């Protein structure tokens, strides 16, 4: 067995909590070693301190039903008129989880440092696909020692992150697996690696091609919860989208603006590739949204950019003082568009939310400028009571902001081609908002995590409008400025500085929104902003979960209440909080990153950079009723890896996660791997499916 426990061969260098130094370099370009990009003097302590909060109850049952029906009514197969032509209307599948009343009965697994994938008793798991596996027709077999960009452009990419599984047929036999490939670890990809400078141009292009997304048709194994790639017959949906060659169309008010024009694209309408795609979401109309996150690290030459542009580049973490910052990927050697001294606007063509239609392999993916530009973790959509669609988004940087988008047009339910065409335009125009939080107990927050006397970290909040359609709501900024330099717009209106907002996802059952705030070891350190009620710990190593309840249960509302149901860490640590649940019964959790829901509305949380000494993992808890806060660990990933995805299939029988950067421990290489997962030789990122041996719904 390739998947057996293995002892740690390398010690690595843990920095900034639990993350290895190699993770910091390759994944986010040593973001924590750079100055905090948000130097705005926008206040961090509530300027309006409320002493009373009107605590909202749960969303009315009728509203819940409407939400779920609205989502389930979107037929994913209708996405591909040509391909779906043979499918009768009765074959149209739903893209939302079927509802079930499931308590989380699995026995939690303990924290561990094993080089294996661990699931609870009564469950099994298997690798669905990993780096280098064939995706597109004609893809060659992976050859570690003779990698080419052409081959990688047809093979499964590196460092899988977001995972979506969209049913293709109503019988639940076939589905499309859609996966982000966030970044590359060249030192773990190429035998004999010494430095990035020593890589050949072809190797750099392999790395560029290993970024992007994959669409892979998968099929159920027997009647189990296991899934495997379709291995025989036509696979018309299978597709690689890469940073090397895939063309993306800009939509929305900033498309065609001066900020997006380059020598290669003088109209500012089409970008080549997508970068650092982190989390994402499935839309009610069966497309996938994906966030372009730490795009800054791919650009060099910021010191040679026009002076007037430098503050804007710096606000996005791009060095304007050195040609090659320490985190540089050196991609300018493969393609000069990554050199900002020559092509200063190229960086503005990344940092967007992209929409991919996996059911139409010929469709050009789009970058939606109406959703703003920042280090987009991802985006998750819900149909509001008003019928408009709302996308929730986080900017994953210390002291950056929480956003939402509300479409101008309303969602059109149903499976018709007319509805699909209409819904595909919903993200092209709307209102972009940033969150400003107010507090109930601001004066009681001492930075230790001690609960205020009212017994909860909570308050009210407002969504501040930055732009609507073609109109800017920020003084001195055009709409193209607001959408292209959204961080500066957030600074200007005094948005609340958060502890790294990662995945932001609404529950389709309740409409309540959950935000993973990963950590912020700079909170309260030096001149950085101090703890506040929503970010209540200084030097915050473990992060927290924020719950947002929109006023009137209306996701398009401009006001909300919020609370922190979970303040992460070791339950024995007094600064932690698990919604008041008995802390002796909950699993330790650190650095929440991605969230997802099952059909019962349970919240699943994956972690990135566990600072408690365990491998990263996946956890689940109820968010309503007496089990709220009863957090249990469902799985752990192998050594050095981060748990990404996660995704619970619409039938609630399978949990997919992406094992990202296994063996990413300083000093590791192909020849001397820190992890040999999954095949027993060297580390390969891969997607794993977990299911219950008795075939029943996960967790129930
Ligand atoms: Fe790519 Fe914010 O994690
Ligand atoms: Ca993430
Ligand atoms: Ca998610």
Image: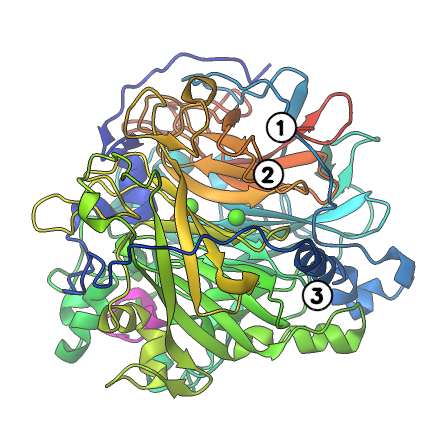
Q: Mark 2 points at which residue?
A: 602
x, y percent for residue 696? 76, 28
Image position of 257 (left or right of 305)? right
Q: How far apart are marks 3 and 1 (CA)?
A: 37 Å
Quadrant of image for the C terminus: top right
Under tag 3, what secondary structure?
A: loop
Of the pair 446 and 73, the residue shown nearer to us: 446
- Residue 522 lies in the magenta stretch: no
Mark found first going from the N terminus, 2 or 1: 1
Q: Which mark is residue 360?
A: 3
x, y percent for residue 535? 28, 46
Q: Residue 314 carries which label?
A: none
Callout 3–callout 1 Cβ contact below 8 Å: no
Tell me what residue is drawn at x 83 percent, y 31 percent: 223
Residue 506: quadrant of the picture: bottom right
Of the pair 387 and 351, the residue shown nearer to us: 387
Q: Distance between the residues labelled 2 and 1?
A: 8 Å
Q: Give the range drawn in magenta.
A: 337-348
Above or below residue 310? Residue 505 is above
Above or below residue 172? Residue 95 is below
Q: How crowded is mark 3: few (under 14 residues within 10 Å), some or many (20 or more)?
A: many
Q: Residues within 10 Å of mark 1 (few under 14, many from 20)?
A: many
Under tag 1, what secondary structure?
A: loop
Mark 3 or mark 1: which is in front? 1
Tell me what residue is drawn at x 38 percent, y 71 percent: 349
Mark found first going from the N terminus, 3 or 1: 1
Q: Mark 1 points at which residue?
A: 104
Residue 129: quadrant of the picture: top right
Callout 2–callout 1 Cβ contact below 8 Å: yes
Work out whether residue 157 can be spotted: no
x, y percent for residue 447? 19, 39
């Amino acid at each position: 067995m390739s998947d057996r426990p293995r002892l740690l061969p390398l010690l690595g260098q843990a920095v900034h909590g639990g993350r290895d130094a190699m993770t910091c370099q390759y994944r986010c370009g040593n973001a924590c070693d750079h100055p905090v990009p948000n130097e705005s003097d926008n206040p961090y302590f509530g300027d309006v301190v409320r002493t009373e909060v009107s605590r909202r109850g749960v969303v009315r049952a009728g509203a819940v039903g409407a939400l779920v029906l609205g989502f389930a009514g979107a037929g994913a197969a209708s996405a591909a008129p040509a391909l779906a032509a043979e499918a009768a209307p009765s074959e149209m599948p739903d893209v939302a989880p079927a509802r079930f009343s499931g308590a989380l009965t699995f026995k939690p697994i303990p924290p561990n440092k094993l080089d294996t994938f661990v699931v609870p008793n009564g469950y099994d798991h298997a690798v669905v696909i990993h780096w280098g596996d064939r995706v597109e027709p004609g893809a060659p077999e992976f050859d570690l020692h003779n990698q080419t960009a052409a081959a990688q452009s047809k093979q499964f990419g590196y460092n899988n992150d977001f995972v979506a599984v969209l049913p293709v047929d109503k019988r639940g036999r076939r589905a499309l697996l859609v996966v982000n490939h966030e970044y590359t670890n060249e030192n773990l990809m190429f035998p004999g690696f010494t430095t990035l400078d020593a890589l050949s141009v072809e190797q750099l292009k392999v790395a560029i091609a290993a970024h992007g997304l994959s669409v892979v048709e998968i099929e159920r194994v027997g009647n189990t919860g296991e899934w495997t790639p379709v291995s025989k017959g036509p696979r018309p949906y299978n597709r690689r989208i890469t940073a090397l060659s895939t063309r993306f169309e800009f939509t929305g008010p900033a498309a065609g603006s001066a900020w997006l024009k380059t020598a290669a694209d003088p109209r500012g309408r089409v970008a080549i590739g997508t970068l650092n795609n982190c989390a994402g979401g499935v839309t009610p109309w069966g497309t996938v949204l994906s966030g372009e996150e730490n795009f800054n690290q791919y650009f060099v030459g910021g010191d040679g950019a026009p002076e007037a542009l430098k503050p804007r580049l710096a606000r996005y973490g791009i060095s304007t003082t050195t040609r090659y910052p320490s985190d540089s990927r050196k991609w300018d050697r493969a393609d000069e568009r990554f050199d900002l001294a020559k092509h200063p606007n190229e960086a503005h063509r990344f940092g967007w939310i992209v929409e991919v239609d996996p059911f139409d392999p010929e469709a050009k993916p789009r970058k939606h400028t109406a959703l703003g530009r920042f280090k987009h973790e991802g985006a998750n959509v819900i149909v509001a009571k008003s019928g408009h669609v709302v996308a929730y988004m986080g900017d994953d940087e210390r002291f950056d902001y929480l956003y939402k988008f509300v479409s101008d047009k309303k969602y059109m339910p149903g499976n018709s081609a007319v509805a699909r065409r209409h819904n595909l335009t919903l993200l092209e125009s709307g209102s972009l908002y940033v969150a400003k939080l107010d507090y109930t107990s601001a004066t009681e927050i001492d930075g230790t995590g001690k609960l205020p006397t009212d017994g909860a970290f909570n308050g009210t909040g407002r969504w501040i409008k930055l732009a609507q359609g073609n109109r800017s709501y920020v003084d001195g900024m055009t709409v193209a400025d607001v959408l292209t330099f959204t961080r500066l717009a957030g600074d200007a209106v005094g948005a609340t500085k958060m502890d790294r907002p990662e995945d932001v996802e609404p529950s389709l059952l309740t409409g309540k929104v959950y935000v993973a705030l990963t950590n912020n070891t700079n909170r309260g350190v030096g001149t950085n902003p101090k703890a506040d009620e929503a970010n209540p710990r200084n030097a915050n190593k473990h992060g927290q979960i924020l719950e947002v309840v929109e006023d009137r249960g209306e996701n398009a509302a401009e006001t909300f209440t919020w609370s922190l149901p979970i303040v992460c860490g070791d339950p024995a640590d007094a600064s932690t909080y698990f919604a008041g649940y008995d802390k002796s019964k909950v699993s330790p959790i650190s650095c929440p990153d991605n969230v997802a829901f099952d059909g019962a509305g349970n919240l699943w949380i994956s972690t990135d950079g566990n600072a408690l000494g365990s491998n990263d993992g996946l956890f689940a808890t109820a968010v309503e009723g007496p089990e709220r806060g009863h957090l249990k660990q469902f799985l752990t990933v192998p050594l050095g890896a981060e748990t990404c995805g996660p995704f619970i299939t619409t039938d609630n029988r399978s949990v997919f996660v992406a094992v990202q950067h296994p063996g990413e421990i300083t000093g590791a290489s192909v020849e001397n791997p820190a992890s040999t997962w999954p095949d027993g030789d060297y580390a390969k990122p891969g997607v794993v499916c977990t299911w219950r041996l008795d075939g029943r719904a996960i967790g129930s």
